[in-house]
Amino acid sequence: MRVTYPSIDKLLAEVDSRYSLSVLAAKRAHQLEAGDPPTLSKFVCDKAVGRALEEIEAGTVTVEGE
């Protein structure tokens, strides 16, 4: 499976490495599935990982310390 939206280039502008991006997206997706409130009002993606990536792109979810 390929990530087409949001693009990797846009996501890497928000996070410093692919590793950090994957860990952040997985952690946020688990939080969303557990019932944490979303940080955006509207999403393009239906799945938790896609929604997590959209939040990262929007800058509403970041790596701690950044």
Image (cartoon, rainbow, N blue to C red):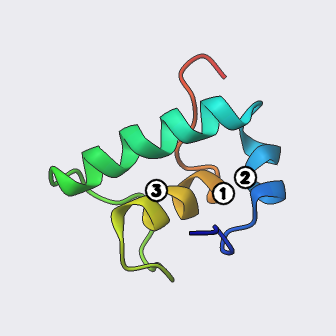
Q: Between marks 1 and 3, how big is the CA–CA gap?
A: 9 Å
Q: Helix or strand or loop: what does disc 3 sit on?
A: helix
Query: Closer to us: mark 1 or mark 2?
Result: 2
Is 48 drawn above or below residue 16 in the view shown?
Answer: below
Q: Is residue 46 left or right of residue 36?
A: right
- State the residue lying farthest toward the top: 65
The residue to which callout 1 is attached is 57
The crowd level at tag 2 (other Cα within 10 Å; few <14, some 14-19, many 20+) is: many
The crowd level at tag 1 (other Cα within 10 Å; few <14, some 14-19, many 20+) is: many
Amino acid tagged 1: Glu
Q: Is residue 10 left or right of residue 62?
A: right
Marks 1,3: beta carbons within 8 A: no
Is 58 drawn above or below residue 21 in the view shown?
Answer: below
Query: First in sequence: mark 2 or mark 3?
Result: 2
Which label is found at residue 52?
3
* Residue 10 % position (x, y): 80, 58
Q: Is residue 20 left or right of residue 9?
A: left
Identity of the residue drawn at 51% across and 83% down: 44
Amino acid tagged 3: Ala
Which label is found at residue 37?
none
* Residue 26 % position (x, y): 41, 43
Query: First in sequence: mark 1 or mark 2?
Result: 2
Quarter of image, res 47: bottom left
Image quadrant holding the C terminus, namely: top right
Is 62 drawn above or below residue 10 in the view shown?
Answer: above
Marks 1,2: beta carbons within 8 A: yes
Q: Helix or strand or loop: what does disc 1 sit on?
A: helix
Image quadrant holding the N terminus, namely: bottom right
Which label is found at residue 11?
2
Query: First in sequence: mark 1 or mark 3?
Result: 3
Identity of the residue drawn at 67% across and 68% down: 6
